[in-house]
Image (cartoon, rainbow, N blue to C red):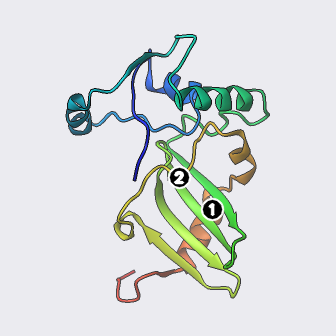
Amino acid sequence: MGGLWWWIHARSVREVRETFAEVEVVVAPDSLAQAEDWRLAEVDIDAPVMPAGLDELRVQRDRQRALPGFGALADREIVYLRQEWDDDDPATYLLEIGADGRRVRQVERTGNGTATRTDTGDWLFNPPVVDLFDPLLADREIDRGEFERWWSTARWEDDHRES
């Protein structure tokens, strides 16, 4: 699971998230200590020129900033979203998302009416799945009551797990 990494000098975590699209800001002390040996490029958030990759994320964020809904979901502890998946196996995902963009709980509703619930204990990896500054997310927000109704009737993905 790759990625591009930099040490970004900024005034706050929020400023980094608001300036660059689709970024994860690592703040866990153990992760930071591990990254100290990686010899990462250092970048000042106010610099006029950014390294390749980071420059594109800033341009993307600048475009988003002008759209209605930009940052509407940022700074919340929990957000509830509906995400449609129109691939070979269409499904609707109802997501409970934490302030860092990671899933907390999820309900998958398939076309045949099956509703399956999963949580952090079910996922080997749980990277951020949404950028809470993304203006397109504002139209996907649902209320907690709708999420909880689906959660309470969904079955666990692993049939032997206790509910």
Residue 78 place in picture, x, y as percent:
52, 48
Q: Is residue 103 left or right of residue 68?
A: left
Taking depth in this image into account, of 144 and 128 the one nearest to the observer is 128
Estimate the spatial distance between the alpha carbons at disc 2 and disc 1, rounded to whole Å. 22 Å
Residue 149 place in picture, x, y as percent:
61, 71
Amino acid type assigned to the residue bearing label 2 in the image: Val
- From the viewer's perspective, is residue 96 above or below residue 30? below
Instruction: Locate the C terminus by quadrant.
Output: bottom left
Q: Residues within 10 Å of mark 1 (few under 14, many from 20)?
A: few
Q: Residues within 10 Å of mark 2 (few under 14, many from 20)?
A: few
Amino acid type assigned to the residue bearing label 1 in the image: Gly
Residue that label 2 marks: 129
Q: Is residue 121 left or right of residue 147?
A: left
Q: Residue at x 54, y 72 (%)?
A: 151
Residue that label 1 marks: 145
- From the viewer's perspective, is residue 152 above or below residue 83? below
Taking depth in this image into account, of 163 and 55 the one nearest to the observer is 55
Q: Secondary structure at mark 1?
A: helix
Q: Residue at x 42, y 66 (%)?
A: 119
Taking depth in this image into account, of 80 and 148 the one nearest to the observer is 80
Q: Residue at x 38, y 70 (%)?
A: 122
Which comes before the other along the chain, label 2 or label 1? 2
Q: Quadrant of residue 110?
A: bottom right
- From the viewer's perspective, is residue 94 above or below residue 163? above
